[in-house]
Image (cartoon, helix red, strand yellow):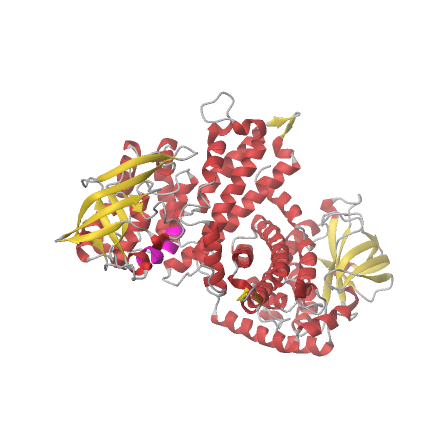
């Protein structure tokens, strides 16, 4: 057993930290994370990350990567997280789409897309969820019908975040329309150019001010060579990528700046002449948050280690995801209680504490146990795959 | 980063599990809970044949020279089997303290005998005035008396005192009682005149004692470590012990989850296994989430204690988390297994009672959270 890092990994972390301290502003971090949209600053930052060699460390050399251990990419995510960043600017391509292309894509698709992802040039948006296909993704209805060298796609997606600034849609659509066919064996993955005629993107604003989108397809023509892998296997590709996505999206380090701000706040803030830091209840709350962050860290270390070593992880990343997302909610809630009356103030208000980051985080945190799969589906997955209980759905 | 345990550790773990399955079934646990000593000589001898007492004793003193992680893995197995008795107090509290702080003479006198199962030790620390865990409040006194020190005071929650040959007693050697800079550890012969032991009746079945020292004379060469250096020594001993307690809890929690998941797969109601109901699935998933966190935080704290020069904060995190998690896991284990598990004959209650003991031993979660708050600068 070894919980340490190699000298090379430590050196990489130091180099990266120095770079981020210089280049990553809070504005970039927030464009990165809050999904108001990756603006020009974050795009520029993305290119710089690539130019300084911080993207693609663990990606294959033949497509522009450096062929090293995945630990390097996890170090990158941790260091971004510590600075409110949470993920690389163009993260759907980098953490979700790219790995599936590498696993399942044709040589032509790999050659076309992987180098652009590693260079920090292009972004994808996930096209999975539909109004009637949420947790039960296999029941999605968007249809793709063959027409010569193309497919013609019709239907509606919802909660497709990043669609308003991405170059490509990573789209799951039904290609086997025979009603007798099993629904999870009739879905195909497409890479769709977001500029294709017939696509309409309509913004949907979340309660914490992030933009996600509804996307409508009206006879959108997609060339057959933009199919990823084999037709009708798309659902499996989505499922096999899940554990890795969880590992790369749910980053415990992202909670560190929130905790650090609260620690700073209770040291500087007085109540009845005494610092809040001396209040036993406040101390206990923040200590518990620190405990949970550390436990989230070892859970993430474990599922990352399994992934980095090519070992199966049937339920471990789900454990990590549920734990981190719920720890985030508890931390946000603790923060709101510590800020008391002032917790209700929003960014920009007179008297707002911690620049409104805590009230924003609290609003945002409702999403964490829903997005990427609800905690309820996750717990059943853990019970079934981790403990061998019978299927419940 | 590497979560693999060595082949040797795997072998030891497997041997321990098989041995305890055969020799330490739950009927035997019940017997040992009633038994005054909490172990049998036969069992002690067999454990010794497996080199368990020698595991962490350095090779130079007839030991195996294993590390804390080896001990953690062994204690997990003991936690699974609800092992009672003086192994923990002898090996965790005794062998570690002497290997770490003993003089060469003391090491030679004690360690080979520990490694060969010939003697048993324990730690006499907590006192009645500490109504909550507060290990550095020591008002038992040790005053110079000729060549000796004369000890007076009362110690509580002393594990396996009646079967110990030597008590490591923390006493105040400073002029002012309760001065943290005046704590000294003494290796006291348990048969010394002036020692009186009274068993306490404890929820987890552990053999806990009140030990009263009345004018107990201890030779000056029986000081363990430095005169007045006890605080720093105790801090390390208790960090080590807290992690070992976590390991026991992890093992117990793992066993509880196995019992609950087995039951959920087999027990049928409404024509289906109850494990197909999501409420039961989610209880079981919660247990697994709590268990995995407990296991890896224990391993990490143990690793850091050995490799990063004693990181107390990580120990505090582990003990706080695992104490709470084990109690939650046993509560969920009861809920999943229903009324049957509320019965004395059912094994579930062995673990829930043990979780109440383990949670408060070497500091409860609130105590450790306060330590963490201090380390955060609060």
- Is A149 or B116 nearer to us in this picture? A149
Q: Quadrant of residue B151?
A: bottom right
Say whether residue A168 is left or right of residue B86: left
Residue stretch rendered in magenta on the structure? A237-246
Q: Quadrant of residue A119?
A: top left
**Image coords of residue A106 (percent x, y):** 20, 57
Q: Main secondary structure of the magenta part?
A: helix
- Is A186 or A382 nearer to us in this picture? A186
Above or below for B71 versus A278:
below
Say whether residue B332 is left or right of residue B162: left
**Image coords of residue B5 (percent x, y):** 48, 66
Q: Is residue A240 magenta?
A: yes
Q: Is residue A314 magenta?
A: no
Residue at the extreme top of the image, as rendered: A350
Say whether residue A7 is left or right of residue A281: left
Q: Is residue B50 visible?
A: no
**Image coords of residue A264 (percent x, y):** 53, 33
**Image coords of residue A128 (percent x, y):** 32, 48
Above or below for A203 versus B187:
above
């Amino acid at each position: 057993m070894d919980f340490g890092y190699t000298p090379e990994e430590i050196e990489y972390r130091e180099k990266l930290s120095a770079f981020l301290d210089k280049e990553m502003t809070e504005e970039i971090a927030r464009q990165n994370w809050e999904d108001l949209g990756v603006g020009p600053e974050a795009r520029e930052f993305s290119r710089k990350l690539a130019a300084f060699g911080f993207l693609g460390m663990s990606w294959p050399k033949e497509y522009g990567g450096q062929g090293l251990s995945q630990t390097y990419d996890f170090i990158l995510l941790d260091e971004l997280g510590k600075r409110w960043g949470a993920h690389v600017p163009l993260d759907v391509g980098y953490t979700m789409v790219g790995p599936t292309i590498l696993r399942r894509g044709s040589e032509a698709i790999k050659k076309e897309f992987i180098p652009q992802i590693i260079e920090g040039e292009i972004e994808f948006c996930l096209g999975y969820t539909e109004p009637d296909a949420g947790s039960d993704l296999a029941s999605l209805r968007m249809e793709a019908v063959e027409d010569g060298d193309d497919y013609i796609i019709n239907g509606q997606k919802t909660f497709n975040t990043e669609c308003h600034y991405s170059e490509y849609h990573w789209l799951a659509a039904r290609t086997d329309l025979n009603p007798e066919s099993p629904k999870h064996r009739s879905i195909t993955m497409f890479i769709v150019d977001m500029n294709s005629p017939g696509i309409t993107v309509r913004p949907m604003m979340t309660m914490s001010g992030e933009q996600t989108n509804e996307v409508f397809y009206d006879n959108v023509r997609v060339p057959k060579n933009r199919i990823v892998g084999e037709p009708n296997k798309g659902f499996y590709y989505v499922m096999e990528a899940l554990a890795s996505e969880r590992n790369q999206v749910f980053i415990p380090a992202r909670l560190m700046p929130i905790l650090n701000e609260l620690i700073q706040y209770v040291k500087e803030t007085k109540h009845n002449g005494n610092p809040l830091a001396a209040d036993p209840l406040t101390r206990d709350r923040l200590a518990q948050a620190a405990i949970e962050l550390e436990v989230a860290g070892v859970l993430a270390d474990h599922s990352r280690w399994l992934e980095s070593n090519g070992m199966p992880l049937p339920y471990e990343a789900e454990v990590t995801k549920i734990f981190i997302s719920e720890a985030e909610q508890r931390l946000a809630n603790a923060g709101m209680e510590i800020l008391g009356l002032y917790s209700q103030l929003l960014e920009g208000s007179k008297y707002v504490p911690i620049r409104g980051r805590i009230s924003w985080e609290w609003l945002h945190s409702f999403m964490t146990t829903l997005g990427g799969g609800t905690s309820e589906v996750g717990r059943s997955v853990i019970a079934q795959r981790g403990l061998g209980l019978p299927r419940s759905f | 980063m590497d979560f693999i345990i060595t082949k040797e550790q795997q072998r030891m773990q497997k041997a321990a599990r098989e041995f305890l399955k055969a020799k330490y079934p739950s009927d035997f646990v019940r017997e040992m809970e009633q038994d005054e000593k909490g172990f049998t000589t036969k069992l002690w001898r067999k454990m010794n044949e497996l080199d368990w007492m020698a595991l962490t004793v350095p090779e130079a003193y007839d030991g195996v020279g294993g590390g804390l992680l080896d001990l953690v893995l062994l204690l997990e197995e003991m936690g699974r089997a609800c092992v009672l008795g003086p192994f923990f107090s002898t090996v965790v509290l005794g062998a570690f303290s002497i290997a770490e702080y003993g003089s060469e003479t003391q090491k030679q006198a004690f360690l080979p005998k520990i490694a060969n199962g010939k003697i048993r030790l324990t730690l006499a620390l907590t006192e009645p005035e500490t109504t909550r865990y507060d290990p550095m409040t020591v008002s038992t006194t040790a005053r110079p008396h000729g060549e000796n020190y004369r000890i007076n005071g009362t110690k509580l929650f002393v594990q396996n005192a009646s079967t110990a040959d030597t008590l490591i007693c923390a006493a105040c050697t400073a002029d002012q009682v309760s001065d943290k800079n005046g704590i000294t550890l003494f290796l006291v012969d348990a048969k010394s005149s002036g020692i009186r032991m009274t068993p306490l009746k404890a929820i987890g079945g552990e053999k806990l004692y009140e030990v009263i020292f009345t004018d107990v004379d201890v030779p000056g060469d029986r000081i363990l470590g430095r005169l007045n250096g006890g605080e720093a020594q105790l801090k390390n001993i208790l960090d080590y012990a807290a992690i070992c307690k976590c390991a026991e809890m992890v093992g117990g929690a793992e066993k509880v989850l196995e019992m609950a998941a087995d039951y959920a797969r087999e027990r049928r109601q409404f024509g289906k296994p109850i494990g197909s109901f999501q409420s039961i699935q989610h209880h079981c998933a919660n247990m697994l989430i709590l268990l995995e966190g407990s296991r890896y935080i224990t391993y990490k704290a143990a690793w850091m204690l050995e490799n990063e020069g004693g990181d107390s904060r990580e120990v505090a995190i582990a003990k706080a988390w695992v104490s709470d998690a084990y109690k939650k896991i046993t509560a969920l284990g009861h809920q999943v297994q229903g009324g049957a598990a509320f019965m004395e004959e059912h094994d579930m209650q062995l673990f829930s009672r043990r979780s109440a003991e383990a949670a408060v031993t070497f500091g409860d979660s609130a105590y450790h959270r306060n330590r963490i708050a201090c380390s955060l600068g609060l």
